[in-house]
């Protein structure tokens, strides 16, 4: 994705704010509709749970293409699932990874290039990837997105295609989503 630098689009820590760009793109699509005001209330600090509910309402209103609302909902749920996966990693896997890295004397290169790591270490990565993937599916289900959860489980390539088409609708050519990386890791181990 080509991105032009603009000082006002960065926070004090100089970090790109994806949510702000997405909010602007959504507002542009909803001008002149009854959804313009709710879209203007979105800020980068709007909790993802609130975004899911709003995006589901926008989908029900049928104002945007299916791919666009699919992306909005999937991105918000993905944000929640990423937080949950990080908590899972911290609570159940981080110490196991650290212990194994120390016991096996793994270098940074072995850790960064999983294919060259010992089978035991790769197996732990696969275990975490499978647990995180199940958590992602469960998070979609928890928000009533059973069709998305089923598609993610059955046909992640199609899920990614629709997600990417929605991203392009709002922001232009897509970069790889976290879900694509997660499923690639799960599939390659």
Image: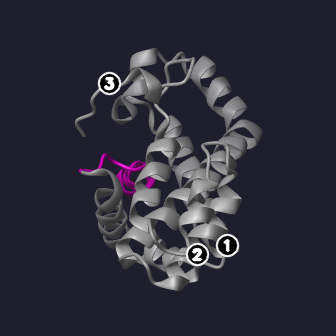
The single residue placed furthest to the front in the displayed view is 32
Q: How far from the left and from the top, in percent, is residue 40?
A: 58, 55
Report the disc number at residue 5: 3
Q: Quadrant of residue 166?
A: bottom left
Q: Secondary structure at mark 1?
A: loop
Mark 1 crowd level (few <14, some 14–19, many ≥20, 10 Å Cα): some
Comparing labels 2 and 3, the label whose residue is closer to the camera:
3
Who comes first in sequence, dot 3 or dot 1?
Answer: 3
Comparing labels 3 and 1, the label whose residue is closer to the camera:
3
Q: How far from the left and from the top, in percent, is residue 17?
A: 50, 35
Task: Report the residue marked by disc 1.
Answer: 143
Residue sitting at x 44%, y 44%: 21
Residue sitting at x 35%, y 57%: 170
- Residue 137 in view here: yes
**Residue situated in front as seen by the camera: 93 or 49:** 49
Judged left or right of residue 176, residue 97 is right
Which region is colored magenta?
A: 173-189
Judged left or right of residue 15, residue 169 is left
């Amino acid at each position: 994705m080509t991105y032009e630098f603009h000082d006002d689009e960065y926070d004090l820590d100089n970090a790109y704010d994806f949510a702000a760009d997405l909010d602007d793109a959504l507002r542009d699509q909803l001008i002149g509709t009854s959804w313009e005001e709710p879209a203007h209330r979105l800020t980068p600090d709007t909790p993802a749970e609130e975004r899911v509910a709003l995006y589901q309402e926008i989908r029900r209103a049928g104002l945007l293409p299916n791919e666009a609302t699919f992306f909005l909902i999937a991105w918000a749920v993905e944000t929640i699932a990423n937080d949950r996966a990080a908590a899972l990693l911290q609570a159940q896997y981080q110490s196991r990874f650290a212990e194994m890295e120390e016991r096996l004397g793994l270098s940074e290169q072995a850790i960064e290039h999983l294919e060259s790591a010992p089978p035991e270490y790769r197996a732990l990565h696969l275990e975490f990837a499978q647990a995180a993937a199940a958590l992602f599916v469960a998070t979609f289900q928890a928000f009533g997105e059973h069709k998305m959860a089923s598609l993610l489980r059955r046909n992640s390539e199609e899920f990614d295609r629709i997600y990417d088409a929605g991203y392009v609708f709002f922001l232009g050519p897509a970069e790889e989503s976290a879900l694509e990386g997660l499923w690639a890791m799960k599939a390659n181990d």
